[in-house]
Amino acid sequence: MAQRHWHNGGAVLAAGLMVGVCAGAAGCSGSPAAAENPHGAGDAVRTLRRAAGALDAAGTSRARTAMEMATGGTRVTIRGEGVYDFRARRGRLTVRLPQDPTGASEHRPITELLTPGALYMKNRGAGVPADKWVRIQAAALSDGNLVTGGATDPYAAAEVLRGTRTATYLGTSVLAGTPVRHYRGTADLALAARAASPGNAPALRAAARGFATAEVPFDVYLDEQGRIRKLRHRFSFVNGQRKAIVAVASTTLLYDFGAPAAVRLPRPHDIYAGHIAENDGEGGGEGGDEEPGTARDENRPSN
């Protein structure tokens, strides 16, 4: 599964770990109000920096995620759906990869368990037995696992807003029947890392160093309780092979607050301790020197 590569117009995308934005996962009905802005810029910045705390108060929710990357004329979208416990900082997503353009059968969904500092993946492929989990150290990835897993951890996504530097209030609209306030702005990953919870700070620091720029443009929709209902980030990273900047858009939708969200982490003996193949032999891989049972940064998308 993750070993398969897709070719189109010279682009090669690692099937298990391509990323991008929500393509119509749940749009807003109506346009943001064009009326006079009732919130000053400073008020908007302070509101968004507090948004992650509003999720703590909410406790749990259901989540949908989408990631999209366009390269070489090909647009690839990965979608996820599951639950998240904001107080325990744990989530579970079922991530579905798009069908191979060559006509091969659909890939098996990947189960992902999200925790501060680590991502667990089942049905990862790359030679990993079907009943085993792969553990990825988020801080060891140059993107802090904001894009590597094909889904951005919902709480990490919210904590990016702690680094909000500029923000504009764009008015109100309705999202899936819920009145929301729309903000657009830019966050700084280094600032977000300094203000983040201890579990997410190392990963955000890694992303601040590893992305092409630490500035992250975003659009966010908050409900009347200040909780995030929809959050869209636009990340940029440098392609490891061609040194070209790749733009990725990630969308997180949160709904059904208070839903059951118990997440049990794998037992140590259920975590794969062998070598993880990086590709199908196209170009080879260094191998042999990574921590057993972990995936390396080369698992990020390549084109």
Image (spheres, helix red, strand yellow):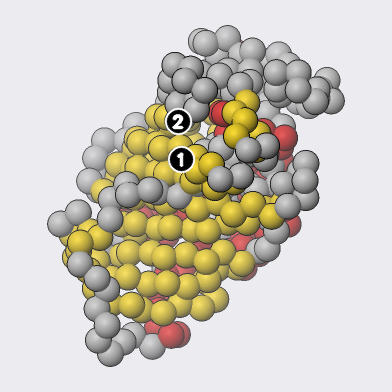
Q: 249 or 81: nearer the eye? A: 249
Q: Secondary structure at mark 2?
A: loop
Question: In this view of the protein, can residue 92 be seen by the observer?
Answer: no
Distance of mark 1 from mark 2, alpha carbons?
A: 7 Å
Q: Is residue 75 shown above or below 214?
A: above
**Residue under numbered circle 1:** 77
Say which amino acid is labelled 2. Answer: Pro
Q: Secondary structure at mark 1?
A: strand
**Residue under numbered circle 2:** 98
In the displayed orientation, state which residue is furthest to the left: 177
Q: In the drawing, what numbered circle is on residue 108?
A: none
Say which amino acid is labelled 1. Answer: Thr
Image quadrant where residue 18 sits: top right
Q: Residue at x 62, y 30 (%)?
A: 7
Q: How many marks?
A: 2
Q: Residue at x 38, y 64 (%)?
A: 220
Tell me the quarter of the image containing the C terminus.
Answer: top right
Q: Is residue 48 shown above or below 126?
A: below
Of the two numbered discs 1 and 2 on the same chain, state the one appearing first in sequence: 1
Q: Position of residue 230 (x, y in %)?
A: 34, 57
Q: Position of residue 289 (x, y in %)?
A: 84, 25
Image quadrant where residue 195 sits: bottom right
- In this rendering, would 142 be left or right of 255? right
Question: In this view of the protein, can residue 23 be seen by the observer?
Answer: yes
Q: Residues within 10 Å of mark 2 (few under 14, many from 20)?
A: some
- In this rendering, would 193 be left or right of 152? right
Tell me the quarter of the image containing the N terminus.
Answer: top right
Do labels 1 and 2 touch, CB within 8 Å?
yes
Q: Residue at x 27, y 83 (%)?
A: 34
